Image: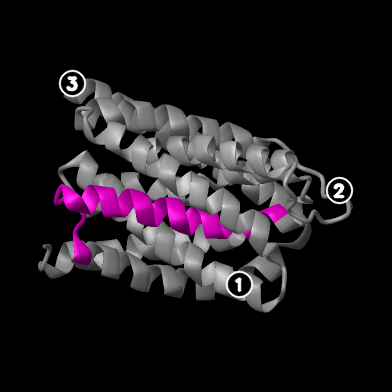
Amino acid sequence: MTTDLLPLGLAVFSGGVVGLLLTLFGGGGSVLAAPLLLYLVGVSDPHIAIGVSAAGVALNALTALAGHARAGRVRWPCAILFAVTGAAGAWLGSSLAKMIDGHRLLLIFAVAMAAVGLSMLRSRPAVARPEPRLNWSMSPGVGLTGAGVGSAAGFFGIGGGFLIVPGLMASTGMSLATAQAASLLSVAAFGATTAGNYALSGWVDPALVAAMAVGGVAGTAMGLPLSKRLGANVVMGRRLFAGLILIVAVYVAVRAILAL
């Protein structure tokens, strides 16, 4: 367990950056957690970086979920089914990832980062539609989609919000806003499952998780008033953030290739 003040302080800062970006731009911000742990905090093992980031993402998602739940935005039946089946998939995906060499896994992770960045460049108009009620006919589709998305999220060690939201919309017919709220339960479930699996192999550092969680709370608090000020500039900001993710993806890929 990390006890040195410098890496713990850098982990707090990293958690703050991730929490701020998640608050400002939503899904996609969590993919920077593992690179920050590796290249700023100085975590040497890619598996530890992924395990710690998964735990931190789960805690941040729970905080955001509580706010949406209080506002009544979460469609619980659909959200719970998607999260439960997805958690089973996340366990399988993370188990497979644990068997892969850390630097090879980082190379695959860089591809996932690039996919996140590209997905953020796409505009998703908010379409008004009746909110769904879970029924027997849609349940198999919701469950299978959740399992597939969870497997990908567990394998890559990311929250998977960029996959969960369209997965919920496609399998249930939710609107974008409702899917974003419901997705947080799955992000928390997938992250917790992945982190728990990595913890069984000793690849989760509790001190770093706690430091990132503290930073995440501060980053979220800073992001809330800033998000209100962005206004019409939020689209441009999101595109710039997507560009940053793509640049970091290239950097992670190059570092991983050089380390092979």
Say which amino acid is labelled 1: Leu
| Residue with the mark numbered 2 | 127
Pick the quarter of the image with the C terminus.
top left
Residue at image coords 39%, 37%: 156
Is residue 40 left or right of 151 when viewed as pictured? left
Q: Which mark is residue 207?
A: none
Q: Residue furthest bottom?
A: 70
| Residue with the mark numbered 1 | 224
Say which amino acid is labelled 3: Leu
Residue at image coords 35%, 73%: 214
Marks 1 and 2, how far apart at CA: 24 Å
Marks 3 and 2, how far apart at CA: 46 Å
**Is 30 inside the magenta-drawn segment?**
no
What is the span of residues highlighted in magenta in the rendered image?
179-206
Q: Say above or below: 42 vs 120.
A: below
Give the secondary structure at mark 2.
loop
Asked whether disc 1 touches disc 2, contact meaning CB atoms under 8 Å apart, the reply is no
Dot 3 alpha-carbon crowd within 10 angstroms: few under 14, some 14 to 19, many 20 or more: few
Q: Is residue 114 visible?
A: yes
| Residue with the mark numbered 3 | 260
> Colour scheme used in the picture?
one colour
Residue at image coords 43%, 27%: 111
Closer to the N terminus: mark 1 or mark 3?
1
Residue 167 coordinates in the image, percent (x, y): 64, 40
Closer to the N terminus: mark 3 or mark 2?
2
Residue 115 coordinates in the image, percent (x, y): 53, 31
* Total count of labels: 3
Secondary structure mostly seen in magenta is helix
Q: Quadrant of residue 239?
A: top right
Closer to the N terminus: mark 1 or mark 2?
2
